[in-house]
Image (cartoon, rainbow, N blue to C red):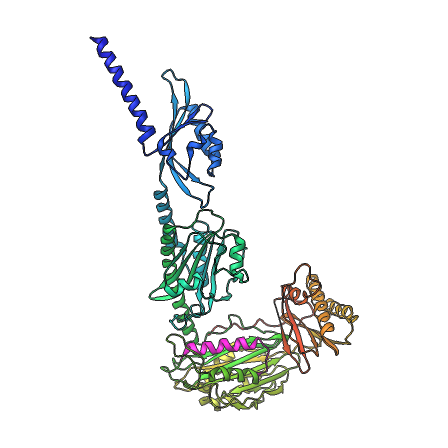
């Protein structure tokens, strides 16, 4: 009886064992891998064999190490060590994440959760290990996406700056989502304006605001950060912006018709081996701000629909942050213009003038002023105003006017030419586009402008006016006079007829620039100026004098914003400048270099500055000898910076170009640009002058006269 019962139980147990093995190897949804004591694969189940992208059954007989390497599994050493520990200790390991990637085209990635158990007989003899793998790719991707979105909420938009926000967004997405990310926004966004359908018309300019590449932080994109770009027609970029629909290019064909190797951006894509792209329009609050582009070239797995959905979510958050930065920039620009604080943070040009200013806001009008450093230690003092009332004044238009003035100042044009160009800009019909103001024009309130240039080497003051009051000159002895400056029409009004007035100023003179809001107190001006500004004895600072004088000159009722700008002139004497004239001959290169180094030795500047200047002089004089016909003039100026100027009779303006390693010529300006803080070209009476500025060593050279620190530009 017992024997019969035992025989039946054994038979049933054998049947259950067979059924269990059949289920595990034929119907189990989990992949089962059996390895022997030497960690060689001896058997896999049906689930493992049915993973077409991972044909594990072809690996039977291979070692675990070979299998891990075949499927490009990272941390192969950790996984192999774990299997050996299970084999030796018998302790199981659960939920070991294994990332697999095929080497085919396209590459396929998967993540499996592995449970590793030791196999042994009843007597304890070790037979091998079993690994049960469950596909958890969807779960892991979803968790990674949620983590990325959570980080975006804390890492993107930490500042109200368009470029910083775009950089934070790019840094977050690389390399976890893409190998390269670019963020291009419409140029109007950078200036704080809301893009409209008209401003987003085909060929609209976009500016590179964000870029990050897995190649490294030093890697530059095309275009570079801050540069303007446009998307050519018949490209996926233009299509994404025109349709406002995100685009997924899972397999990029290098022979695609829209790829043009002659275009820099397309050439970079082809060179890098980009195989997959995502293009996502940046949209927020009903506005289209630009385009975010995601590229894969290092990660062989192409983008799919889930990647596109994640990129859209990330871009939506970044778009809100970018629009916040745009609106903040707009409001901040308006507020700074209205309060008169859109001046340089630290007043430049201390070698030419000491500057102090006071702004008295009344909440109306658009009065403003600027101090702009020019080449050759010169300084430009600019003042402007509008006759508009509070409701008609356009602060943004004033801001664009000031931006245009600063850009024109870089051209080193005479004051009358600058006003003529401003007049032309203001006279052009402005597009009627909501949210995009233009320069003051014929249909807006007249804007006045005064442009004054002072040269501390020659003590020459050159001024031109477009409907603005002439500056007042206070002589060192206290005499007061208004400079005789021809006044042309306000900007955008009438016919542009401006003429520059030149006047040599006595050393230590003071120029006063103001607007018409202070004219009501003009009787006080003649009584106050000689006793205060003309005094030479130690007394209150220039800023304190400016504040006190402005309060005296302002009328009892201030109906318009008022300002007062004081500029006490300096002079750079013979101990701070030197000029040499050489005949046009190749032999003068060494002579000019020797003259410059000898002068720098007298000024006792640093050795590095001497070496750099010698190289700059050599390059600039060599170019002058090559292209000019007449004599060549070299001038050195030691002010707050060291300025080197080379003038010749050639009117051809040089251009900076990138010389190749094999080129024998074309390096002069490139070398100059690398060694200097800034350089440029300006016209002279006959020909041109190329100038270059270098920063001095932190300590003041002994031969330099002691100067007080310049007064800050903040409104008291």
Q: Quadrant of residue 314?
A: bottom left
Q: Position of residue 101 (x, y in %)?
A: 44, 41
Residue 529 falls inside the magenta stretch: no
Question: Camera-side residue: 683 or 469?
Answer: 683
Q: Residue furthest left?
A: 1
Q: Quadrant of residue 478?
A: bottom right
Q: Position of residue 33 (x, y in %)?
A: 39, 29
How many labels sit on residues?
0
Res 120 visible: yes
Q: Position of residue 199 (x, y in %)?
A: 41, 72
The boundaries of the magenta stretch are 394-415
Q: Quadrant of residue 49?
A: top left
Up/down of 240 relative to 119, above or below: below
Res 540 visible: no
Up/down of 26 relative to 470, above or below: above
Residue at 57% x, 79% y: name it: 380
Position of 127 with respect to 649 (left or right) is left
Please identify the quadrant where the N terminus is shown.
top left
Q: Position of residue 569 (x, y in %)?
A: 60, 80
Residue at 35% x, 82% y: name it: 391
Up/down of 33 relative to 185, above or below: above
Residue at 62% x, 78% y: name it: 570
């Amino acid at each position: 009886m017992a024997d019969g019962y035992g025989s039946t139980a054994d038979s049933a147990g054998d049947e259950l064992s067979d059924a269990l093995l059949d289920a595990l190897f034929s119907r189990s949804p989990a992949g089962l891998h059996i390895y022997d004591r030497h960690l060689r694969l001896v058997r896999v189940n049906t689930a493992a064999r049915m993973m077409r992208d991972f044909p594990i059954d072809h690996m039977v007989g291979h070692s675990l190490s070979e299998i891990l390497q075949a499927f490009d599994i990272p941390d192969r050493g950790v996984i192999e060590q774990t299997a050996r520990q299970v084999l030796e200790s018998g302790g199981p390991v659960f939920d070991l994440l294994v990332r697999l990637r095929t080497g085919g085209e396209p590459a396929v990635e998967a993540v499996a959760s592995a449970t590793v158990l030791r196999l042994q007989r009843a007597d304890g003899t070790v037979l091998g290990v079993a690994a049960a793998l469950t596909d958890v790719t969807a779960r892991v991707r979803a968790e990674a996406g949620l983590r990325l979105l959570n980080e975006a909420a804390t890492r993107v938009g930490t500042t109200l700056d368009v470029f910083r926000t775009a950089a934070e967004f790019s840094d977050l997405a690389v390399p976890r989502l893409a190998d390269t990310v670019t963020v291009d926004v419409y140029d109007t966004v950078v200036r704080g304006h809301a893009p409209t359908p008209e401003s987003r018309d085909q060929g609209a300019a976009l500016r590179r605001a964000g870029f990050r590449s897995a190649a490294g932080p030093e890697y530059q994109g095309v275009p570079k950060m801050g540069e303007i770009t446009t998307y050519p027609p018949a490209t996926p970029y233009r299509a994404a912006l025109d349709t406002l629909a995100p685009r997924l290019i899972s397999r990029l064909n290098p022979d695609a018709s829209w790829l043009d190797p002659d275009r820099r951006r397309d050439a970079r894509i082809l060179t890098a081996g980009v195989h997959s792209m995502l293009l996502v329009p940046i949209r927020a609050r009903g506005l289209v701000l630009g385009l975010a582009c995601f590229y894969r070239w290092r990660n062989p797995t192409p983008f799919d629909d889930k990647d596109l959905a994640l990129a859209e979510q990330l871009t939506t958050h970044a778009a809100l942050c970018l629009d916040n930065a745009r609106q903040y920039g707009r409001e901040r620009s308006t507020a700074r213009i209205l309060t008169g604080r859109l001046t340089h943070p630290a007043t430049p040009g201390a070698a030419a003038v000491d500057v102090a200013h006071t702004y008295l806001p009344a909440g109306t009008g658009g009065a403003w002023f600027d101090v702009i450093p020019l080449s050759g230690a010169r300084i430009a003092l600019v003042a402007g105003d509008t006759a508009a009332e509070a409701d008609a004044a356009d602060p943004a238009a004033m801001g664009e006017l000031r931006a245009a003035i600063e850009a024109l100042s870089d051209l080193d044009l005479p004051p009358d030419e600058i006003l003529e160009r401003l007049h032309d800009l203001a006279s052009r019909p402005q597009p009627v586009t909501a949210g995009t103001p233009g320069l003051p024009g014929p249909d807006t309130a007249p804007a006045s402008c005064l442009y004054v240039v002072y040269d501390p080497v020659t003590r020459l003051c050159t001024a031109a006016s477009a409907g603005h009051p002439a500056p007042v000159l206070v002589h060192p002895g206290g005499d007061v006079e208004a400079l005789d400056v021809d006044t042309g029409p306000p900007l955008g009004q009438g016919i542009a007829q401006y003429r520059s007035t030149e006047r040599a100023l006595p050393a230590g003179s003071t120029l006063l620039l103001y607007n018409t809001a202070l004219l009501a107190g003009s009787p006080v001006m003649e009584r106050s100026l000689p006793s205060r500004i003309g005094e030479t004895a130690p007394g209150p600072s220039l800023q304190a004098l400016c504040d006190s004088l402005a309060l005296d000159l302002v009328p009892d009722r201030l109906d318009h914003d008022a300002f007062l700008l004081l500029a006490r002139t300096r002079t750079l004497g013979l101990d701070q400048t030197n000029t040499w004239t050489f005949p046009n001959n190749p032999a003068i290169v060494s002579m000019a270099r020797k003259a410059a180094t000898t002068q720098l030795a007298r000024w006792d500047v640093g050795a590095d500055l001497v070496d750099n200047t010698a190289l700059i002089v050599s390059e600039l004089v060599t170019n002058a000898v090559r292209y000019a016909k007449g004599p060549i003039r070299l001038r050195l100026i030691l002010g707050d910076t060291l300025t080197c100027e080379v003038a010749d009779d050639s009117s051809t303006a040089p251009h900076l170009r990138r010389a190749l390693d094999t080129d024998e010529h074309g390096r002069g300006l490139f070398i100059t640009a690398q060694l200097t803080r800034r350089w440029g070209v300006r016209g002279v009476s006959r020909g041109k002058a190329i100038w270059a500025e270098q920063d001095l060593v932190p300590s003041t050279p002994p031969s330099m006269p002691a100067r007080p620190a310049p007064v800050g530009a903040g409104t008291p």
